[in-house]
Image: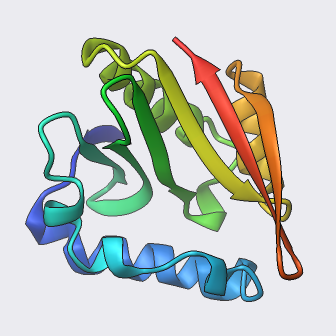
Amino acid sequence: MQVRKFDTKDSADVKNLIVSILTKEYPFDKSVYENSDISSISDTYGGRKDVFFVIESDDDIIGTVGVKEDSKDTALLRRLFIKPSCRRKGYGSLLLSRALNHCRKNHFKQVVFRATGRMAQAINLLKKNGFKEAEKIDLGGFRIYKFVLDL
């Protein structure tokens, strides 16, 4: 089991994992989230304080998480996904821990994550790690929750 930074050779596997999960588990929410960032991960997460991590098991990418600078003090946590057959084994916690360590090293003061109400496992993981619900946004039949962690 290895958490590591994204490499361009991972592009197809990462995109397939994320699109597969969105299509199967969040078909109604998919329209809320654009896929443009996963078409060019190196560009999207190529900023000085940005990073995209994958977790790999036996050369198979089983999870992802991205950190994107939103402002000098705020990072966006994005694309926290774990392959369904690998959930509830601590892999999400490993990815989240690595992402939060990256945020601390880069002197972010706050981390923000947005989720729909259907993302119960991700929401539980965030709450378990100190994130607090900061806002609810109704978007034409969808409710988006904004979670914040002060570092």
Q: How many numbered badges does the structure rendering display? A: 0
Q: Is residue 106 left or right of residue 126?
A: left
86 w.r.t. 9: above or below: above
Residue 70 lies, with reference to residue 150, above or below; the image says below
Q: For this view, does 111 lie left or right of residue 5?
A: right
Give 99 or 140, whichever is nearer the viewer. Answer: 140
Percent x, y of residue 53: 31, 46
Residue 137 is situated, as x and y percent measured from the top left of the image, at 80, 58
On screen, residue 80 versus residue 89, left or right, reads: left
Residue at position x 48%, y 52% in the image: 78
Nearest the eye: 118 or 6: 118
Where on the picture, by quarter, is residue 109? top left
Q: Position of residue 84 (x, y in %)?
A: 65, 65
Q: Nearer the viewer, residue 50 or 7?
A: 50
- For image coordinates 62% across by 22% down, the residue present is 149
Q: Is residue 17 above or below residue 137?
A: below
Residue 47 in picture, x, y percent from top left: 15, 46
Find residue 13 and report its image quarter: bottom left
Q: Residue furthest right?
A: 141
Residue at image position (60%, 44%) is: 113
* Picture colour scheme: rainbow
Quarter occupied by the N terminus: top left
Residue 130 occupies quadrant: top right
Report whether 130 appears left or right of 68. Answer: right
Figure check: 47 above or below 131: below
Identify the residue at horizontal 12%, vertical 58% (top origin): 7
